[in-house]
Image (tube, grey):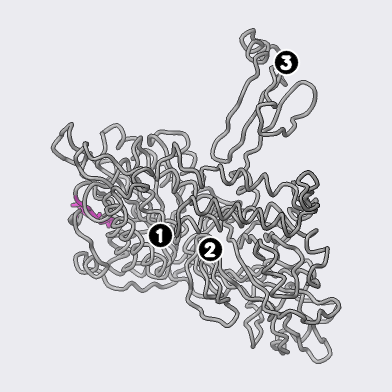
Amino acid sequence: MADPQYATLEAYDGVRFAWNVWPLSRIEANRMVIPLGLMVTPLKRTDSLTSLQYEPVRCRGCQGILNPYSQVDFASMIWLCPFCYNRNSFPPHYQGITEGQLPGELFQEAVSVEYVLQQPVRAPPSFILVLDLSQSLEALTEMKQSVKQMLQMLPEYCLVGLITFGAMVTVHELAASEIPRAYLFRGTKETTAQEVAKLLGLGLVQYKRQAGMPGPSGTPGIGRFLLPYSECDYTLESIIDDLQPDRQPSSRKQRLVRATGAAVGVGVGLMENCIPGTGGRLMVFTGGPCTTGPGAVVGLALEDSIRTHRDFEKSAGVKQFKKACQWYESLGRRMAGSGHCLDVFACSLDQVGVAEMHDAVSVTGGVVVLAETFSHEIYRKSLARLFELDENGYLQMFFNATFDVIMSKDIRVSGTTGPVTSANNKSPLASEVELGVGGTTSWRLCALSQATSLGMFFEVAASHGTVLEPGQILCLQFQTQYQHPSGQHRLRVTTVARPWAEPNAPEIASSFDQEAAAALLARQALFRCSQEDVFDVLRWIDRILIRVASKFGDFTKDNPASFRWPPSFTYLPDFLFHLRRSQFLQVFNNTPDETAFYRLTLEREGVQASMLMIQPTLTSFTFEGPPQPVLLDVASMRPDSILVLDTWFMLVVHYGKTIVEWRKAGYHLQPDQDAF
């Protein structure tokens, strides 16, 4: 669909530009309709990544890091920053470098490098399990089995904790003792971090680095409620085995009392007191909606139906919905400030309140898994995939990251979309026009993976008529400092460059990457959905397409048949057509929880995954040749073909009439029909 060179560049540096040539004019940039933006995967796994075991060399002026685009004067040992053009001296240990003996970050292919920083580690990753007891015995048994299987995949040094909830919230002590201890909190009350600390007897925790993997220093909070899994595996699994459904009066006219919001609040307070500023995940396993206390989604009476999209249109039940959203928004801000994330594993035929939790999960970078039961294959495989280990035996999840962008003097950053919160780093390079989370050049990510992608938007600051010097390029540098599961602090630095062009230069239109542009527009549309009606967002997409056609299309006035798209724009109308009809914007036949799940997923995936969600691929398998992609049209259905529809969220297989008859006849079981 798009030029394959863009996908090749993305595989190399993890960055995909919507426009690969930028006009050196603010006015012309605004006329291009589609913003100057890019999709970046900060920790993308690449074969060309260079690992460096020393501290980076920074520019004194802009804090940019030495990179292949820096100009080096070997005679005077000075390097010129490509962002602010400040001249910097090399540190003493660089004095031996020459043109034939370069440090790793100056090689031309080293556009992405990773520094292993020499910083002390405070604590290993922490996982607090929040388990729902307001379930049937069968459902609870399935949940306990899956949680125990997950614990077997945890590295032994990881800290773990346990909270259970029903009508009340229970925090369990994991320290070995003859009599297990537990602390009860009211399920109807909003509990602050200070109240959690007081009731549990906690104070701020200090850590020390021990031999090998870092561990706790034995303070009360860590030694009691959070312990390395190797030290509490027997106690923890014994408590889980002994868990029973919450004792509540049985009634066919009422839902079970379930204090999910209060349990999450207690978990947030526990993490704030025990592991502030250290990577951790609060993992909620629930089998139904919250019915009491903060974050309640629906009342206890079964006659009170849970909210739907139709209720939002009629403003019915919005008061309770907004109140629950405000509770989780406040928890999300607290978790983001401490570097923790919220995961939700919802296994229920009913909605559980993911729509209300959306903001808390989104800003902290958590994951959401929706399934019908705790024995469902999707839930089991998703949980196992989250805890997969890499070739070195470490979890493939990263924590407590900061993401900074350094840019050329003629560029301003408008904002970022994705699982980020602002680090409130005010900068003159932040645009006054905000798209997404703006007003800063630095963001926080509580949790991310190698696939987590951010959408970034920029604007040109150069005034119209600025002289373009020969060979002038724009440079962007992305700095991601994060906590590795090994306990190390690492800094991933990716530096990219693209050419400038004169306004209206033909190479601007030919450099358009329609897939990246569609992914960015989808993110922009989702961000607008949180602030305005979906109908208005659909009209906005229509206006975008009309303006792009007017700007870049080739046509004769008053002759619609003469319209032609440039080759680099050919598929953009199709992408936007499918975006308008997608489950991200069309809520018919979806619950609010499902819509929130779909949007959360799109907000963090890269270009290829986003395009698969927006426009699913349809592949035809026949005996006439190798599999071929075909159009999403009824005309692609043939009696002698098998169609496979990949929507990213699910696979759908369609068998033609002839294929069905062959299967009934058992042709696929014959030795000479292996291909069939």
- Residue stretch rendered in magenta on the structure: 168-181
Query: SS class of the residue under badge 1?
Result: strand
Image vertical order of residue 211 relative to residue 9, above or below: below
Of circles 1 and 3, the one toward us is 3
Query: At x 43% / y 66%, what residue is drawn?
Result: 339
Q: Compute the Cα span from label 1 to label 3.
A: 52 Å
Q: Nearer the viewer, residue 674 or 366?
A: 366
Q: Compute the Cα span from label 2 to label 3.
A: 49 Å
Most distant residue in the left direction: 249
Tell me the amino acid under the disc marked 3: Gln
Q: Nearer the viewer, residue 339 or 258?
A: 258
The residue that disc 2 covers is 484
Write down the quadrant of residue 43 in the picture.
bottom right
Q: Main secondary structure of the magenta part?
A: loop
Question: Is 260 covered by the magenta stretch?
Answer: no
Q: Position of residue 8 (x, y in %)?
A: 76, 54
Which mark identifies residue 51? none
Query: At x 55% / y 43%, what residue is drawn?
Result: 582
Q: Position of residue 345 (x, y in %)?
A: 39, 45
Q: Compute the Cα span from label 1 to label 2.
A: 13 Å
Q: Nearer the viewer, residue 636 or 669?
A: 636
Image vertical order of residue 297 relative to residue 619, above or below: below
Using a 10 Å C-alpha cutoff, classify the residue at mark 3 as few (fewer than 14 neighbours), some (14 to 19) or many (20 or more). few
Using a 10 Å C-alpha cutoff, classify the residue at mark 2 as few (fewer than 14 neighbours), some (14 to 19) or many (20 or more). many
The residue that disc 1 covers is 126
The residue that disc 3 covers is 673
Query: Which of the two labelled residues, at mark 1 and mark 3, occupies the earlier sequence position?
Result: 1
Question: Is 172 covered by the magenta stretch?
Answer: yes
Of circles 2 and 3, the one toward us is 3
